[in-house]
Amino acid sequence: MSDGNPYLHYVSSLARLAHDGKQFQLGGFPIPAHPPVASDAPKALIFSPHPDDECIIGGLALRLQREAGYRVVNVAVTQGSNKARQQGRWDELTQACRYLGFDLVQTVPGGLEKINPKTRGADPSHWATCVEVIARIVAEHQPAVVFFPHETDWNSSHIGTYHLLMDALGQQGPTFACHVVETEFWGAMSTPNLMVESSVQDLADMMAALSFHVEEVRRNPYHLLVPAWMQDNVRRGGEVVGGQGGAAPDVLFATIYRLRQWKDDALHHTFDGGRILSAATSPITLL
């Protein structure tokens, strides 16, 4: 059955690469030299529900840093639920962010706890304390862009982080404005409006940074599957962002987002339809 079937070689090559990737070094790579960031550079804050999210969904943030001079700050909303691993995960996260050139902010020692929709309804006092922490970080940094998961991203901490940010943004006052980029990983958005291409170099750097989360990827080498996830984003994004029945975009790796703007104490759409940002177009054109 394989005679004359070129896809056997294609699939076999993918399988071989995935197998060989399991033997690659995890973390420990030399930290690259990063261009200095201007003291008055606009800031993009990534609110990561868990350590490692910054490396997975950060394609647009990395491009804003590299192509538009943004200062990217990863806010570690939680450090995982396993208390015995929280310090270890913080140490891994520190190195991952250093590798990408991201700044890193800790919410509280050990990270916030019980960030989920259940807590928001059942323990309003604890929830209000957590919102206050995030609101203070937003007020301090005055970001031009914030990244956080969308409201149905399946994982309870991801959904909790969405509500945490929405509540914290609501405390900034009517004069505060920023762009909001909602991300997806565990659950697909029904109404995304942006697909952002990542170059081969950017994706390779994100995978290398993700490998610094050594204990997480050692038990489950999900860092090796990020390219396949990004390719599937292209398959889906070509239709749900680009328009049903439209021409397939000439993009190999991409991340899907929903871009809106927070102003006047609410989220507002900034453009109609969907946009596909190629690697050849500056991300500053989005903002």
Image (cartoon, helix red, strand yellow):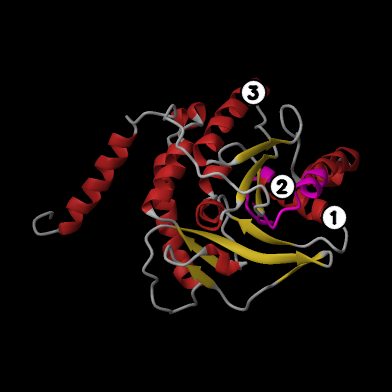
The quarter of the rendered structure image containing the N terminus is: bottom left
**Mark 3 = which residue?**
87
Q: Residue at x 68, y 60 (%)?
A: 180
Q: On the rendered structure, is 45 left or right of 221?
A: right
Q: Quadrant of residue 74?
A: top right
Q: On the rendered structure, is 5 left or right of 114?
A: left
1 or 3: tag closer to the N-terminus: 3
Q: What is the three-letter code of the residue carrying label 1?
A: Gln
Nearer the observer: mark 2 or 3; the answer is 3
Query: Where residue 139 sits: x, y (%)?
Result: 81, 49
Query: Where residue 50 sits: x, y (%)?
Result: 62, 38
Q: Residue at x 49, y 62 (%)?
A: 196
**Mark 2 = which residue?**
161
Q: Residue at x 22, y 46 (%)?
A: 12
Query: Where residue 244 sits: x, y (%)?
Result: 48, 77
Asked whether the beta carbons under mark 2 and mark 3 sit within 8 Å of each other, the answer is: no
Farthest left residue in view: 3
**Mark 1 = which residue?**
172
Looking at this view, is 123 or 37 the one in front?
Answer: 37
Q: Which residues are magenta?
A: 135-157
> Is 150 within the magenta?
yes
Q: Quadrant of residue 132?
A: top right
Mark 2 is surrounded, within 10 Å at the Cα level, by few (under 14), some (14 to 19) or many (20 or more) other residues, namely: many
- Height in image: 111 above or below 46? above
Looking at this view, is 214 or 282 the one in front?
Answer: 282
Cα separation, mark 2 vs mark 3, equals: 21 Å
Label 1, secondary structure: give it. loop
Cα separation, mark 2 vs mark 1, equals: 17 Å
Question: Does the image show residue 136?
Answer: yes
Asked whether the beta carbons under mark 1 and mark 3 sit within 8 Å of each other, the answer is: no
